[in-house]
Amino acid sequence: MENNDSSLTEYAASKSKFLTLGEGEEVRVKFLSVEIVPSRFDDGKNKSVQYHLEYEDTEKILTSASGDFARKMAEIPKGSLILIKRTGQGNQTKYTVTKVASEAQIAFPTEFLCGKSSKQPETISPTGN
């Protein structure tokens, strides 16, 4: 008997208030708000940011301590549709954030690059590196 039942994984994810992305996974979400909170990794000595996002009609939280990620998200108006893609694992995790101009452009998003003129999305690390 195998314990890798994807229906159980999907069920667990649906019950969590946190948005969890796997390696290479990309999701479309609506950016709702942010909250600065004590970091859970160092007994609150440092701060992290909780990004409140709407995913599949449910509010989810993505937590990151990355200053680069915070600067990029600060440029995105609340209520915007965005694509978030995760690459890497552990402290090597990086996110690519792309602003979507409208529902109709989900298949062809406009890159959002915080003042950069390059056409390539900017890759950022949740640890600020």
Image: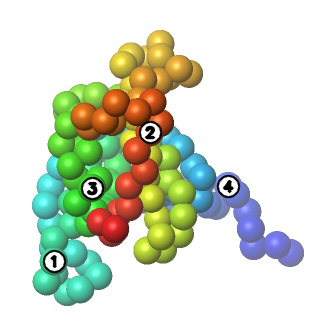
69 left or right of 7 in image: left
Which amino acid, mark 2? Pro
Q: Secondary structure at mark 1?
A: loop
Q: Quadrant of the N terminus?
A: bottom right
Q: Secondary structure at mark 3?
A: helix
- Disc 3 to disc 4, C-alpha distance: 35 Å
Q: Secondary structure at mark 2?
A: loop
Which amino acid, mark 4? Ser
Give the residue number, with chain letter if any, for mark 1.
46
Q: Position of residue 81 (x, y in %)?
A: 35, 29
Which amino acid, mark 1? Asn
Depth-wise, is mark 4 or mark 2 nearer the camera? 2
Q: Are marks 1 and 3 in contact (CB under 8 Å)?
A: no
- Please tell me whether residue 118 is drawn above or below residue 4 in the rendered image: above
Front residue of this view, candidates 4 and 1: 4
8 left or right of 17 in image: right
Q: Earlier in the sequence, mark 3 or mark 4?
A: 4
- Disc 2 to disc 3, C-alpha distance: 13 Å
Instruction: Inspect this view and state whether residue 53 appears.
Output: yes
Q: Residues within 10 Å of mark 2 (few under 14, many from 20)?
A: some
- Please tell me whether residue 37 is drawn above or below residue 59 in the rendered image: below
Q: What is the number of the mark on residue 121?
A: 2
Q: What is the number of the mark on residue 7?
A: 4
82 left or right of 87 in image: left
Q: Earlier in the sequence, mark 4 or mark 2?
A: 4
Q: Position of residue 16 (x, y in %)?
A: 42, 59
Q: Residue at x 22, y 60 (%)?
A: 67
